[in-house]
Amino acid sequence: MRYSISLQAEGDREFTLEETIELADAVAPLEGIASGMGTWGYGAQIVVEAENSDLAVEKALAVFAEAIAKTNLPVWPVARAESLAEDDDYAELEDLIP
């Protein structure tokens, strides 16, 4: 099953626009988007395939760390990770359709 995983790392200084762009480039192959400009951390939303939510988060943490390692970005600890199964996302949309 496909999961969308949101990850948020906390840092010790403000994250810049240039760093956010570098992060976006790093997570793009993971169907990812980046965030963090002007905040004290950075984040990404990436897509992984796994059997369940726990395994999806575990896999996302690993590929996120690999993506960060390929950049010049600071390595900050991930403070939050949330998962949403693709099937759950579609179910929410179906509830909105009359």
Image (spheres, rainbow, N blue to C red):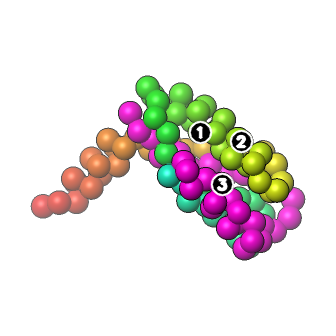
Assess disc 3: are there few (<14), some (14-19) or many (≥20) residues with their C-alpha within 10 Å of its C-alpha: many
Query: Percent from the top left, x then y, of residue 27?
Result: 61, 53
Q: Is residue 1 visible?
A: yes
Image quarter of residue 44: bottom right
For the residue marked with disc 2, what is the amino acid? Answer: Ala
Secondary structure under tag 3 reads helix
Query: Percent from the top left, x then y, of residue 12?
Result: 87, 59
Assess disc 2: are there few (<14), some (14-19) or many (≥20) residues with their C-alpha within 10 Å of its C-alpha: some
Q: Magenta residues, as a range?
A: 1-30
Secondary structure under tag 2 reads helix
Q: Does 98 sit left or right of 55 as displayed?
A: left
Earlier-in-chain disc, 2 versus 1:
1
Residue drawn at point x = 75 percent, y = 66 percent: 19
Task: Please check the rendered image and state whether residue 51 is part of the magenta-colored stretch, yes or no.
Answer: no
For disc 3, the marked residue is: 26
Image quarter of residue 18: bottom right
Residue drawn at point x = 29 percent, y = 49 percent: 90
Earlier-in-chain disc, 1 versus 3:
3
> Disc 2 and disc 3: Cα gap in Å?
10 Å
Residue drawn at point x = 77 percent, y = 54 percent: 71
For the residue marked with disc 3, what is the amino acid? Answer: Ala
Earlier-in-chain disc, 2 versus 3:
3
Query: Percent from the top left, x then y, of residue 89?
Result: 35, 49
Assess disc 1: are there few (<14), some (14-19) or many (≥20) residues with their C-alpha within 10 Å of its C-alpha: many
Q: Is residue 45 visible?
A: no
Q: Which mark is residue 65?
A: 2
